[in-house]
Image (cartoon, rainbow, N blue to C red):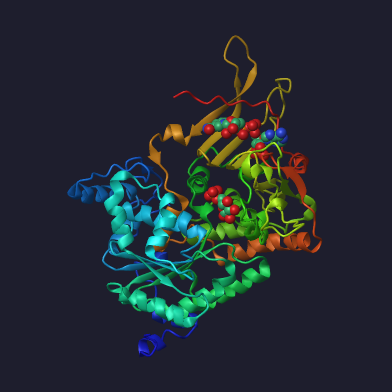
Amino acid sequence: MGTGSSKDRSRQSTSPEDTSRVNPPPSSSDSHSYSSQLVGGANPETGEPCRQVHSLTAQTGHGNNTMSNVQTNAVSSVQKTKDQLLKGVSILKETLDSQDDVPHVFVVFGASGDLAKKKIYPTLWWLFKDGLLPRQTYFVGYARSDLTVQAVRDKSTQYMKLQDDEKDKFEEFWKMNSYVKGSYTERTDFEHLNQEINTLPKGDLAHRLFYLALPPTVFKDVSSNVRLCCMGHEGWSRIIVEKPFGRDSESSADLSQHLSKLFREDQIYRIDHYLGKEMVQNLMVLRFGNKMFSPLWHRDHVQCVVITFKEPFGTMGRGGYFDESGIIRDVMQNHLMQILSLVAMEKPASTSAEDIRDEKVKVLKCMPPLELQNVVVGQYTGDPQGEGDAKNGYLDDKTVPKGSVTPTFASAVVFVKTERWDGVPFIMKCGKALNERKAEVRIQFKDVPGDIFGGQCKRNELVIRVQPQEAVYCKMMVKAPGMNINPEESELDLSYGARYKGVKMPDAYERLILDVFCGAQLHFVRSDELREAWRIFTPLLHKLEKDKIKPAPYKYGSRGPQEADDLARKFGFIFSGTYKWTKPQL
Ligand SMILES: NC(=O)C1=CN([C@@H]2O[C@H](COP(=O)(O)OP(=O)(O)OC[C@H]3O[C@@H](n4cnc5c(N)ncnc54)[C@H](OP(=O)(O)O)[C@@H]3O)[C@@H](O)[C@H]2O)C=CC1
Ligand SMILES: O=C1O[C@H](COP(=O)(O)O)[C@@H](O)[C@H](O)[C@H]1O
């Protein structure tokens, strides 16, 4: 079992100091040294400017692979792909190149689960086939189920967007995989996992990444067991934790404290996949790389900011799981708050992970806790006229507890009490079973003072559409073309699909998992961000639960409860209903 050696015994302590003995302190190939370089700034060694990868061309992205079937061409094609993807990201490239000879082991805990099959294995495959992972990267699935690599492969292949000419590469990928069955609680099972890792070529020397694609109930057991039994001897070890990071301030603090006893902060990657989305990452550049926005980004000009997440489907029979959290914990407290802090923060001193996260934390610190009077919660009902899933309301889902008051929709108004934002309502809105799929930031500007057009001018809006069809557009007034001087609503439209035709955007998980390989923590949640976010939401969540506040019903496929529109209106958002967008014919 390998537990008897002095080496193994030294791995049984649980203090962070010991962790750093097991994992030597970060070297030039570890975290801080290059995390700061990914969104700009200069490479300290070469002085070259560095940028984050922001686009993949159609030829290189998954779904559009043009790699030759001829084996020799395939090798150079992968190298070309890698070079293209990493163009302008010298630190990332150097880091990956410098790690190329060191084996890496990526362990997927919860390999039998939904997230693993839909997101993690497909992401690993895309990174692998694009040549972005270190050459010797092994993937180890771990779960309680009695599975094989073939079974994991069968479950996940449908999500991998495999192309006909990728079959050989696909076989290569699965050859790098293994599967270990084990519990999440028993130490002996983790010792067995460690043995399995050690039997991989140079496995005992490998850098190790542990992805917890698991329900929160087992986070603590698994992280403790990883720390006790599976840490790298020579290489570094990093742990990736999926949300939810707790249910409220107390449970989150408890989890944070637990993790901090086991791992250093630079070994912990709390993933919020919205931070990996192109348009969320774009907020930094839009805001701080353009002169024209900065003076307007202010309470003097902005009426309100609306941050929206909508999904057109309900819980699809998985309501039992959703009911544990509800939409506020599922989306608002994390994804929308992350977006809000990027929208509201001051310019950081640099693009380093710590400088940016410091500014995000400052925003959160300036936000008082949410008040019930500024919140609308809703729950969807079935639409008898709807098709399939739409016929069912949330409470019709058999996995949902009878009479549940868990919100599937929430709208909340928060304030950021800084000199820049004091008095400006930030309206967050999120829901399932709504009329469309959409995530966006909408900045609505104030009315033009001293109107000379007889009230015909509508407010300007700057919209950053995160998904689908990424876009930045500005709704504005222009003179209606012709023999008149009448104002008309129009737009400045930067639709990515048109402007970056054929350019493939990497998936959020691809960016984030690659960041973990590279030790870049910018796009991950720091523990103090988490603490502040929970401080803002905990009193509201407790009140909703204690008083069993009944959510307003809304019909499946609608825009949500009317009360949410009333709330937005009360805080100054005006929907004129007159704007019409004509899709450009390209
Ligand atoms: N580049 C591009 O692709 C561009 C696309 N467009 C498209 O044009 C269309 C219209 O643009 P858009 O900016 O959304 O303008 P709209 O005027 O249609 O909507 C503006 C906002 O009003 C809200 N709203 C909609 N109906 C009501 C209502 N009855 N009461 C209160 N609020 C309401 C919407 O919120 P909610 O989300 O809750 O419904 C949205 O936040 C969109 O489909 C957009 O995607 C426009 C410009 C460029
Ligand atoms: O974290 C979550 O996000 C998804 C939506 O992610 P997206 O990338 O498809 O927008 C949501 O469906 C899920 O409930 C939530 O837990």
Between 122 and 427, the residue placed more toward the observer is 122
- At 46% from the left edge and 74% from the top edge, which residue is drawn? 182
Between 75 and 490, the residue placed more toward the observer is 75
Q: Position of residue 555 (x, y in %)?
A: 72, 41
In the picture as drawn, the residue positioned furthest to the top comes out as 483
Q: Kindly indicate the quadrant of the structure image that contains residue 249.
A: bottom right
Tally of numbered discs: 0
Q: Position of residue 35 (x, y in %)?
A: 42, 60
In the picture as drawn, the residue positioned furthest to the right comes out as 547
Q: Quadrant of the N terminus?
A: bottom left
Where does ligand 1 appear, by image quarter? top right
Instruction: Classify residue 246 as left or right of residue 26.
Output: right
- At 48% from the left edge and 80% from the top edge, which residue is drawn? 16
Residue 55, compared with residue 13, is above or below; it is above
Between 114 and 499, the residue placed more toward the observer is 114
Q: Position of residue 25 (x, y in %)?
A: 39, 75
Residue 190, compared with residue 475, is above or below; it is below
Work out whether residue 231 can be spotted: no
Instruction: Classify residue 504 as left or right of residue 576.
Output: left
Instruction: Classify residue 103 as left or right of residue 297.
Output: left
Q: Kindly indicate the quadrant of the structure image that contains residue 578.
A: top right
- At 53% from the left edge and 42% from the top edge, which residue is drawn? 467
Q: Quadrant of the C terminus?
A: top left
- At 55% from the left edge and 60% from the top edge, which residue is drawn? 358
Work out whether residue 506 can be spotted: yes
Q: Kindly indicate the quadrant of the structure image that contains residue 530.
A: bottom right
In the picture as drawn, the residue positioned furthest to the left comes out as 72
